Image: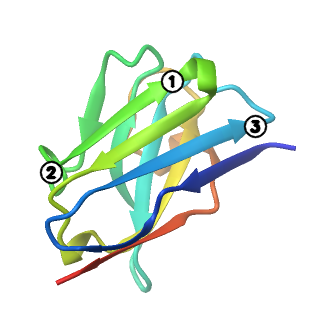
Amino acid sequence: QVLLVESGGGLVQAGGSLRLSCVGSGLTFRNYAMGWFRQVPGKEREFVAAISWTGGWTTYADSVKGRFTISRDDAANTVYLQMNSLTPEDTAVYYCARSTIGAVTTTSVAYGYWGQGTQVTVSS
């Protein structure tokens, strides 16, 4: 059974930090790009960050650039999202996803496997 399980979400005050983790089972992250997306009710899922299969390339949404950092540990089949200087606008359900390719991509259709999401709520 293929599973991606996110953790680390929760309630935090504005200006605070959270670190999200995503562990995969039944599939490997090695050789594939990984991404984080987020969604708020009534809106489309939006791209947050992605990392290439080597870890050498990363890309971020403009709204999180300089505040969020994506990283990966293939030995642990885990991808992380360090989120600093959080604002209420970052409140959303955050999803990790494994791409079908190795190169960095921001397009959700390029991701074939998704986690169930973890809620991040930032209070003002």
Label 1: how many Cα within 10 Å (few below 14, some 14–19, many 20+): few
The residue sitting at 68% across, 38% down in the picture is: 24
Residue bearing mark 1: 73
Residue name at image x 42 percent, y 86 percent: 42
> Gap between marks 2 and 3, in whole Å?
31 Å
Task: Compare residues 11 and 70 and report the one nearer the observer.
Answer: 11
The residue mark sitting in front, 2 or 3, is 3
| Residue 121, image quadrant | bottom left
**Residue at position x 37%, y 45% from top?**
81
Question: Which numbered disc flags the more N-terminal residue, 3 or 1?
Answer: 3
Q: x and y percent of residue 19 in the render?
A: 38, 50
Give the residue at mark 2.
Answer: 62
Residue positioned most to the right: 1
The Cα–Cα distance between marks 2 and 1, rounded to whole angstroms, is 24 Å
- What is the crowding at mark 3: few (fewer than 14 residues within 10 Å), some, or many (at least 20)? few
- Residue 65 in view here: yes
Residue that badge 3 annotates: 25
Q: Quadrant of the N terminus?
A: top right
Position of the C terminus, as image quadrant, is bottom left
Between 37 and 8, the one lying in front of the other is 8
Marks 1 and 3: in contact by CB < 8 Å?
no
- Tell me the amino acid under the disc marked 2: Asp
Vertical placement of 62 versus 11: above or below? Answer: above
**56 or 15: which is nearer to us?**
15
**Mark 3: which secondary structure?**
strand
Q: Sequence order check: which comes first, mark 2 or mark 3?
A: 3
